């Protein structure tokens, strides 16, 4: 499984993206994209940018996959492609969007915490330092070999959170299902000492600055302001 996942990124590099005419005609009557995810944050980001979409669970449990020797960039790109490819059966004539997000600290990938103790460990690791957040994105068209795969990154700087604030956060359960055990906008709103260099939406699960440009180039109506 490790070898096949590692090869996905290499095989996925295709020719320049062209949207087939039949899909262009169908797009006016269908959602602009099919999101292979039930992430509320990703759906919120798409809606904020005015991108019509529907969503379904891709049925991929990446916790069962091993990264092997691939780089963090290749890993998130491969997982994004796996999710998009798995969601093709639920979409007709519209691109399927898959995404995956990880944090990287000192070269080590940090995904979603498995439990409260793991979330506590991750926050202590991220406190008083900087880390990168990588989001891999894949657009795949049903019935076509066309796909567009890319990775966006941002750097997050975290100050002193404090024991009391960390313990209260762990008790709230808000860390569940979040790469790095946190959501950027939520923690900034809560007054945590967090700063982002790059596209904040990359940290939230979809790099909308890059994605919206790609979708707009395919004829989708996109609000570039995200308002």
Image: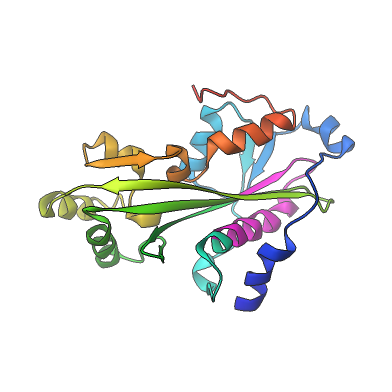
Q: Is residue 155 above or below residue 60?
A: above
Q: Quadrant of the N terminus?
A: bottom right
Q: Residue at x 80, y 50 (%)?
A: 15
- Picture quadrant where residue 50 is located: top right
What residue is rendered at 35% in x and 45% in y? 183
Residue 133: x and y in percent read 43, 51
The correct choice, above or below, for 99 with respect to 28 in the image is: below
Residue 158 versus residue 116 in the image, above or below: above
Please tell me which residue is depicted at 55% across the width and 28% down the height of the picture.
Answer: 49
Please indicate whether residue 138 sits to the left or right of residue 141 in the image.
left
Toward the viewer: 99 or 26? 99
Residue 177 visible? The answer is no
> Which residue occupies the extreme right position in the image?
21
Residue 185 visible in the current orientation: yes
Residue 85 magenta = yes
**Relative depth, front residue between 5 and 107:** 107
Count how many numbered circles sit on residues in the image. 0
Residue 180, image x and y in percent?
Answer: 36, 56
In terms of secondary structure, what is the magenta stretch mainly?
helix
Q: Position of residue 8 (x, y in %)?
A: 68, 66
Q: Magenta segment range?
A: 76-98
């Amino acid at each position: 499984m490790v070898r096949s996942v590692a090869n996905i990124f290499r095989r996925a590099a295709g020719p320049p993206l062209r949207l087939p005419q039949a899909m262009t005609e169908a797009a006016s009557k269908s959602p602009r994209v099919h999101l292979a995810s039930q992430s509320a944050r990703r759906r919120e980001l798409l809606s904020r940018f005015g991108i019509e979409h529907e969503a379904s669970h891709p049925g991929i449990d990446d916790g069962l996959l091993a990264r092997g020797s691939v780089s963090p960039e290749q890993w998130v790109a491969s997982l994004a492609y796996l999710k998009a490819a798995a969601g093709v059966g639920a979409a007709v004539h519209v691109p399927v969007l898959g995404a995956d997000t990880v944090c990287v600290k000192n070269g080590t990938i940090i995904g979603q915490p498995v439990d409260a103790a793991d979330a506590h460990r991750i926050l202590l690791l991220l406190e008083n330092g900087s880390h990168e957040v990588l989001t891999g994105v894949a657009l795949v068209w049903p019935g076509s070999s066309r796909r567009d795969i890319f990775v966006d990154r941002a750097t997050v700087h975290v100050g002193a959170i404090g024991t009391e604030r960390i313990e209260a956060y762990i008790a709230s359960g808000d860390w569940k299902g979040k790469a790095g055990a946190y959501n950027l906008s939520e923690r900034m709103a809560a007054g945590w000492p967090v700063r982002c260099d790059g596209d904040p939406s990359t940290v939230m699960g979809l790099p909308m600055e890059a994605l919206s440009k790609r979708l707009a180039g395919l004829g989708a109506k996109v609000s570039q302001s995200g308002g």
